[in-house]
Amino acid sequence: MQESEGGVVAEDVRRRLLRLLASGALRPGDRLGTEREMAARFAVSRATLRSALVPLARAGLLERRTGRGGGTFVRAATVAREAAERLGLPERLEAAGHTAATALLASVVRPATEAERDTLRLDGDARVVEVERVRYADGLPLSLDLARFPLDLVPGLLDRPLEGSLYAELAATYGLEPVTTEEEISVVHARAREARELAVPVDAPLLQVVRVAHDADGRAFELSEDLFRADRVRLVARGTTVSVTRR
């Protein structure tokens, strides 16, 4: 059954919501509440409230989510990310007019795992620098990033600023720049910790991007696993064949 846009009362609720959006009182990602909560807030019936939300949802201003933690939310702007990206995320976000921020979760030097040694072509006793961060776009979580670098290529990296672009830091301090990148993209579901860091429900879809970057000499200097909120990112491929799998 097609939803109605309602009458005068529904139109008044829509105008009130639009004023809240225009004033900045409601920001991207804000939760307005359940139908019951919103109907009480605006002193209207739930049927009228639903009618008021229809054109706002159609216009892409609001989105309604079901399940635990559901309700009506202000839709966040999506971020375009190019497949096989060679720019740092802050540079890409700022170039597209988004604000960028980073929260450092952990950084450590540890022995490389067998998989890391195989991918990065490391010796058996090699160590890696591991950096885990949450990246934000326009004040909302965008991705949870886990990057690993061979320690012998980036000595002292943990003493450097890690909240900005790691690619900019690698280029300026170590002369390492991604000339070629290989990426494998999968659709996965958020586990409890990932959901908490990215502010999404458990089992929400995430885009997992596993990336290996090589410098001009063909050395693999980065192995990263980035988990992007599927509702906040658009993958763009220009002259690149991208394989996407679902797990």
Image (tube, rainbow, N blue to C red):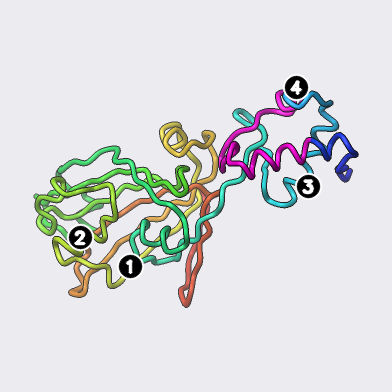
- Name the kind of residue labelled 1 in the image: Thr
**Amino acid type, label 4:** Ala
Report crowding for label 2: few under 14, some 14 to 19, many 20 or more residues within 10 A (C-alpha).
some
Q: Earlier in the sequence, mark 4 or mark 3?
A: 4
- Magenta span includes 34: yes
Q: Report x, y in % for residue 94.
A: 41, 59
Q: Who's the residue at 14% across and 62% down the image?
A: 174
Circle 2 or circle 1, nearest the eye = 2
Q: Earlier in the sequence, mark 4 or mark 2?
A: 4
- Which tag, 1 or 3, sits closer to the chain's start? 3
Nearer-N-terminus badge (1/4): 4
Left or right: 204 as drawn, with respect to 218: right
To which residue does mark 2 refer?
170
Tell me which amino acid carries mark 3: Pro
Viewer-proximal residue among 196 and 121: 196
Task: Report, in whole angstroms, how far the alpha carbon at label 2 lies from the one at label 3.
Answer: 47 Å
Q: Which residue is mark 4?
A: 40
First-in-chain label (2 vs 3): 3
Q: SS of the residue at dot 2? A: helix
Disc 2/disc 1 C-alpha distance (Å):
15 Å
Dot 3 surroundings within 10 Å: few (below 14), some, or many (20 or more)? some
The image quadrant of residue 171 is bottom left
Task: Check disc 3 and report the residue beneath it.
Answer: 55
Residue 12, image x and y in percent? 81, 37
Q: Residue furthest bottom?
A: 239
Q: Are marks 1 and 3 in contact (CB under 8 Å)?
A: no
x 72%, y 52%: residue: 59
Residue that badge 1 annotates: 181
Q: Residue at x 55, y 54 (%)?
A: 78
Magenta segment: does it hold 41? no
